[in-house]
Structures are given as C-alpha cells and as structure tokens.
C-alpha cells in the first residue's frame, strides 16, 4: 500500500481515483447508494446498491438508469483493480456500507447512515475492518445516549393504549421508509389495530415483498379511524386534520433533547432511532480499527476531535478541522 485514498466532499463523497461518488445528492454519472432516503438519492446515470435499496430507489425515483445490484458479502470488480463488497448497515431494510479494497491504497469503508444496535425491520449491522473509515456521525455528542429500545417501545405502546382508552386517536409521526416499518413491527405484541398513511402503506407493501412480516394494518380511513393507531410521516397536516381528538407523538432520536415535545409540537416524543448513538459510534470505530477516520454529518467536527484525543487520525469532511498540538513543557 503506497498511496492513500483521496476523499472529496461536495453534496456527497467523491473518490476521484475511481470516478465514483458515494451517496451523491446531485445527479452524477456513477454513485453508490447506501439506502433510499430522499437525502441520499438523485437521478444518477449509474448506481451500485443492494437489491433491497434498488427496489426502494425505483419506487421513490422512477426512471431509466444502469443499476448494479450487489448482494451483501459478494465482491464486485470495479475499475483500477478495486473490488467492492457491500455489508448491511442496520439503518433500514437494504441499507448498506461499501468496503472498497485496493492493492495500492488499502481498504476503505463508507458506512452511510447506520445503526449498530439490532432493529426489528433491518438487517443487523456489520463491522468489517478497514484502513480508512468514512462514517456518519449524526448523534456524535456524549449527551446522545439512547435508552434501551424495549423501554422506548413499551412507552409508545402505553401512549397508544392510554390515548385510545381516553377516547382519543394516537398518531405516531415516523418517516415513511424505515422508521414506520420499525414501529409497526414494534407494535405487534400490543395487538392494536393500525392504519397507515398512503405512502407509508405503499412502502410497507414493498417490505412485505422483500420478506418482512408485519402485524395487521390497513390504509388510513377517516370514517373508521376510531380505536386505531395511525402511523404517518411528520408534517402530514392534511391527514391529521381529519382525525378527531388526535394526540401526536414523534418518534426520533432527537427526543433525547430536552423540550422535544415543544419543538415538534406533539403530546409525546420517543427516542427510537435508526442511527447510531454516541456509545455505538465509539464502539464502531473500535471494531473497524481504522488507521484514518473521516466523519460526516451531524456533529462531525466534534467527533473527529474526540477521536484525535484517543490517538486516532480523524478529520471532519466539509469542516475546517482544528488540530490539537501538545504545548511545550
């Protein structure tokens, strides 16, 4: 290994040595797509992704493009002697990390959005070792320690049961792809009837086609919503306006912050996230054992500084990095 990976950040990560982008947010010739959330996709000419992500990508952004679907764990030859292997990221169903291996530059792992703790509606996250790590750092401050998911789910179920018992309708605000399906599966032990927003319903049916099972659900119907739990995306104002006695709860990792219910204007906020919390971010670095780390999104600069205090070469992409030097004795 005689050369390092060049990493350029501009609305996505660019690797000029192989002319590929990673999660580019604007149209490019070729981009790896880690998952199909809207801030990670664009109308690229060619994409590399997992089979599950390919299905969701086409559902959200139809059109003609060259698609290479790469199952987890299978190596794929790219240009310049580089091989690519996808590993599950644990973020949503089909979400993947990409491990690039080069005889000249060693290995590079790009995580995309990931969650180290196992979820209910996504493949478990893998932790392959790599020389260079580009990692998502959304919750990269010590205060972001998520409570046990069993505890959070019990709180969500209690909120739904209490609201229905009081004659209200509980509405759980979740992103339509990923979080909604996680919450729907989490509600299974409660046996509560569930209605889904139309877009959430469409994507949940795709989950079913990919082999994920759910408790009973049906499309939202304002004429028969009594006694149901409603799952819908945030800002579904037109739907919520048709629900009498609605009580809303937002499902997000940001619920850890004080005053979340006031920020989101909800009756409750539950810290269930599809991103890694602070302890998981540190643990991930320990498991991958990289020689260099690039941090990306969220508190990237702060987490890079934290890693440097631990003796790890780390830089935040898209930020000016304040490097620490020991003072003379």
Image: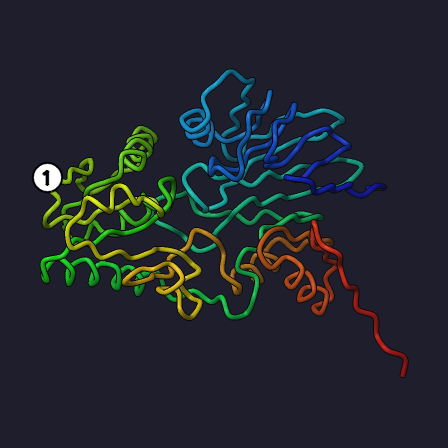
- Seen in the picture, residue 187 relative to 162 is either above or below; the reply is above
* Quadrant where the N terminus is found in the figure: top right
Answer left or right for 253 relative to 279: left
Answer left or right for 9 relative to 270: right
Residue shown at 38%/50% (left/top)?
119
Q: Nearer the viewer, residue 22 or 299?
A: 299
Residue 236 position in % (x across, y down): 31, 44
Q: Nearer the viewer, residue 51 or 164?
A: 164
Task: Specify the farthest residue to the top.
Answer: 64
Residue shown at 48%/39% (left/top)?
95
Residue 293 position in % (x across, y down): 69, 53
Q: Nearer the viewer, residue 30 or 320?
A: 320
Q: Secondary structure at mark 1?
A: helix
- Seen in the picture, residue 208 relative to 68 is either above or below; the reply is below
Q: Quadrant of residue 68?
A: top right
Residue shown at 19%/44% (left/top)?
242
Residue shown at 76%/26% (left/top)?
80
- Seen in the picture, residue 290 relative to 64 is either above or below; the reply is below
Answer left or right for 261 relative to 276: left
Q: Report the residue marked by disc 1.
A: 223
- Seen in the picture, residue 31 relative to 166 is either above or below; the reply is above
């Amino acid at each position: 290994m005689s050369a390092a990976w060049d990493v350029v950040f501009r609305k996505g990560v660019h690797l000029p040595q192989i002319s590929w982008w990673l999660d580019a947010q604007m149209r490019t010739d070729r981009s790896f797509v880690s998952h199909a959330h809207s801030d990670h996709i664009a109308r690229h000419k060619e994409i590399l992704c997992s089979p599950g992500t390919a299905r969701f990508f086409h559902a959200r952004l139809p059109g003609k493009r060259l698609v290479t679907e790469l199952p987890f764990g299978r190596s794929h030859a790219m240009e310049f002697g580089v091989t690519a292997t996808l590993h599950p990221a644990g973020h949503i169903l089909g979400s993947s990390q990409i491990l690039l291996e080069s005889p000249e530059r060693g290995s590079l792992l790009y995580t995309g959005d990931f969650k180290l703790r196992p979820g209910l509606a996504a493949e478990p996250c893998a932790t392959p070792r790599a020389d260079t790590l580009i990692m998502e750092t959304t919750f990269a401050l010590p205060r972001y320690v998520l409570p046990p998911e069993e505890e959070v789910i019990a709180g969500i179920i209690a909120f739904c049961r209490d609201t229905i018992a009081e004659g209200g309708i509980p509405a759980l605000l979740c992103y339509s792809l990923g979080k909604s399906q996680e919450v729907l599966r989490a509600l299974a032990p409660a046996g509560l009837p569930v209605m889904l927003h139309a877009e959430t319903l469409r994507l949940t049916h795709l989950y079913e086609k990919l082999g994920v099972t759910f408790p009973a659900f049906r499309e939202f119907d304002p004429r028969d919503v009594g006694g149901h739990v409603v799952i819908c995306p945030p800002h579904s104002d037109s739907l919520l306006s048709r629900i009498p006695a609605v009580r809303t709860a937002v499902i997000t990792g940001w619920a850890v912050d004080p005053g979340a219910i006031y920020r989101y204007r909800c009756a409750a906020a539950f810290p269930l996230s599809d991103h890694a919390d602070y302890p998981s971010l540190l643990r991930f670095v320990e498991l991958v054992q990289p020689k260099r780390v690039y941090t990306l999104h969220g508190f990237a600069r702060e987490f890079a500084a934290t890693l440097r205090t631990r003796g790890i070469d780390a830089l935040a992409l898209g930020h000016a990095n304040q490097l620490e030097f020991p003072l003379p004795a």
